[in-house]
Image: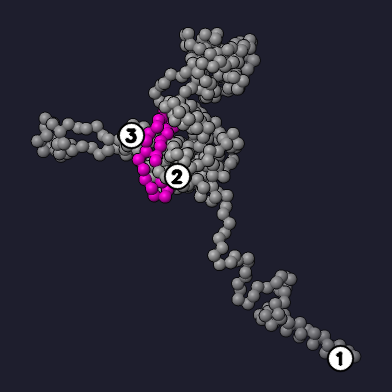
C-alpha cells in the first residue's frame, strides 16, 4: 500500500511539473489557459486589439479643437504701410563721394515703413476689429484671410484711448466670429489666442484666463484687460482671444516681456469694451463717452485712516474742474467717490469706465463720502473731450 502511494504521488508531481513547463513556454497548447496570476494571456503574436476603429474613421474632436476650427477662419493678418518722408534730391554735397558713401545716391528715398498685426472679422458685412497701434499713421492697410484671399481695408476709425481700430473689407462669403458673453468669463477658463506672430502665419496658442480687470498698466486710458498665459507675441496684436466654445471674448493687445517674446503674461481688451467702441465708430464716426471733470486717484488706506473716513474703498478726488459738471453738482477736492449710478467704484480705472459709459446730457447720481458725511450728488454728465493717447 505504501509503495502504491509513493508511485501515485510521484506521478502527480511529474504531471504538475509538465503542466507548469508547458503553461510557461507553450501556453497555446493549453487553449489560452490563464497565467499564474489568473489573467488572460495575450495571443501568441503578442499583439492586443484594444478597440481599433474601422478604417477611415476619425478620432472625436476635443473641445479646444472645435473652438480653433470655428474661430480661425475669421482671424486675419493685417499689414499697415506708411510712406516715408520724402528727401530732397538737391543736396549741397551731392557730388561728394563721401556723401554718396554715407547717404546714398541723390534722389534715393528710404523704404516705406511696414507694420504687421492681426485682426478679427466680427460681421459678415466685412467689419474688422484690430488695435489702434497696429494701423496708427498708416497710409494703406491690407488684409489677408486664412483662406488666402487678400483685400485692401478701409479705415473706419480708431480710438487711441482704448487702443481699438475698426476696418472694413469688401469680399463675399466672409466668416465672422460670434461675440462672447464677457460677464460669464471667469479666472481659470480655457482660452485660445489666434493671430500671426512674427509673420510666420496663423498660429493658435492655448492657455487660461489668469486675471480679469487688470488696470494701471499705462497702455491706454481705459484699461480693463483680460490677462492670459496663452502665448502672445509681436504680430498677435489685434488678434482674437476666444473661449472654449470659439466665441470672441477679447482683442489681444499687449504683453509683459523683458525679452520681446512671450513670458506668459498677455493682455486682451474685453469684447464688451471693443464692441462699444466699434458701435460708436461705425454709427457716429467717433466714440461718445461721459465726462464729469474731476481728477481722481486711488484711495490709500493710510489716507482713509488719517482722516477717520468710515470707508476704506473708493476713489479720492484731488481736483475738480471749475464750472465743470462735478463742480456744478457740489463736488469738492477731498471727496471720496464710492458709487456712480449705483455702481460701486474702488479704483481710478473703474471710475473712468463707469463715467465713460454714462450718456452725455444725462443725469447720474454719484455717492460721495465727505468726512463723516455721506452725500448723493446729482451730476449732469458732459461729453468727454478728445485727448491724445
Residue 25 higher or lower than 338, as above or below = below
- Who comes first in sequence, dot 1 or dot 3? 1
Classify mark 3: helix, strand or loop. Answer: loop
Q: Which residue is mark 3?
A: 138
Looking at the rendering, the stretch of residues picked out in magenta corresponds to 145-170
Which numbered marker is on residue 174? 2
Which numbered marker is on residue 163? none
Residue 16 higher or lower than 113, as above or below = below
Report if residue 164 lies within the magenta region.
yes
- Who comes first in sequence, dot 2 or dot 3? 3
Which numbered marker is on residue 3? 1
* Front residue of this view, candidates 198 and 364: 364
Q: Nearer the viewer, mark 1 or mark 3?
A: 3
Alpha carbon distance from label 1 to label 3: 110 Å
Residue density around tag 1, few if under 14, some if 14–19, many if 20 or more, within 10 Å? few
Q: Give me the residue at 22% from left, 32% from top.
A: 86
Amino acid at each position: 500500500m505504501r509503495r502504491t502511494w509513493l508511485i501515485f504521488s510521484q506521478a502527480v508531481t511529474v504531471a504538475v511539473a509538465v503542466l507548469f513547463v508547458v503553461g510557461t513556454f507553450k501556453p497555446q497548447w493549453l487553449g489560452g489557459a490563464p497565467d499564474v496570476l489568473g489573467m488572460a494571456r495575450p495571443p501568441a503574436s503578442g499583439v492586443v486589439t484594444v478597440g481599433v476603429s474601422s478604417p477611415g474613421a476619425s478620432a472625436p474632436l476635443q473641445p479646444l479643437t472645435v473652438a480653433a476650427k470655428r474661430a480661425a477662419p475669421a482671424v486675419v493678418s493685417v499689414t499697415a504701410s506708411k510712406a516715408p518722408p520724402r528727401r530732397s534730391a538737391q543736396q549741397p554735397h551731392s557730388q561728394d563721394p563721401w556723401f554718396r558713401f554715407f547717404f546714398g545716391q541723390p534722389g534715393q528715398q528710404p523704404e516705406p515703413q511696414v507694420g504687421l498685426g492681426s485682426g478679427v472679422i466680427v460681421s459678415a458685412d466685412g467689419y474688422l476689429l484690430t488695435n489702434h497701434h497696429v494701423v496708427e499713421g498708416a497710409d494703406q492697410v491690407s488684409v489677408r484671410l486664412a483662406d488666402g484671399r487678400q483685400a485692401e481695408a478701409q479705415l473706419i476709425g480708431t480710438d487711441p484711448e482704448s487702443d481699438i481700430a475698426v476696418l472694413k473689407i469688401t469680399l463675399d462669403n466672409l466668416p465672422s466670429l460670434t461675440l462672447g458673453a464677457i460677464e460669464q468669463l471667469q479666472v481659470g477658463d480655457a482660452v485660445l489666442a489666434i493671430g500671426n506672430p512674427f509673420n510666420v502665419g496663423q498660429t493658435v496658442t492655448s492657455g487660461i484666463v489668469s486675471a480679469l480687470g487688470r488696470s494701471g498698466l499705462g497702455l491706454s486710458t481705459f484699461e480693463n484687460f483680460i490677462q492670459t498665459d496663452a502665448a502672445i507675441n509681436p504680430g498677435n496684436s489685434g488678434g482674437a482671444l476666444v473661449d472654449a466654445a470659439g466665441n470672441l471674448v477679447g482683442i489681444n493687445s499687449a504683453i509683459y516681456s523683458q525679452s520681446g517674446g512671450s513670458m506668459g503674461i498677455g493682455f486682451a481688451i474685453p469684447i464688451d469694451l471693443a464692441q462699444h467702441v466699434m458701435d460708436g465708430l461705425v454709427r457716429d464716426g467717433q466714440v461718445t463717452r461721459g465726462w464729469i471733470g474731476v481728477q481722481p486717484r486711488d484711495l490709500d488706506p493710510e489716507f482713509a485712516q488719517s482722516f477717520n473716513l468710515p470707508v476704506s474703498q473708493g476713489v479720492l478726488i484731488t481736483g475738480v474742474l471749475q464750472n465743470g459738471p462735478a463742480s456744478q453738482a457740489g463736488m469738492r477736492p477731498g471727496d471720496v467717490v464710492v458709487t456712480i449710478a449705483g455702481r460701486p467704484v474702488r479704483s481710478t480705472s473703474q471710475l473712468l469706465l463707469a463715467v465713460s459709459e454714462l450718456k452725455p446730457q444725462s443725469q447720474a447720481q454719484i455717492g460721495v463720502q465727505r468726512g463723516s458725511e455721506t452725500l448723493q450728488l446729482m451730476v449732469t454728465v458732459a461729453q468727454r473731450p478728445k485727448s491724445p493717447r
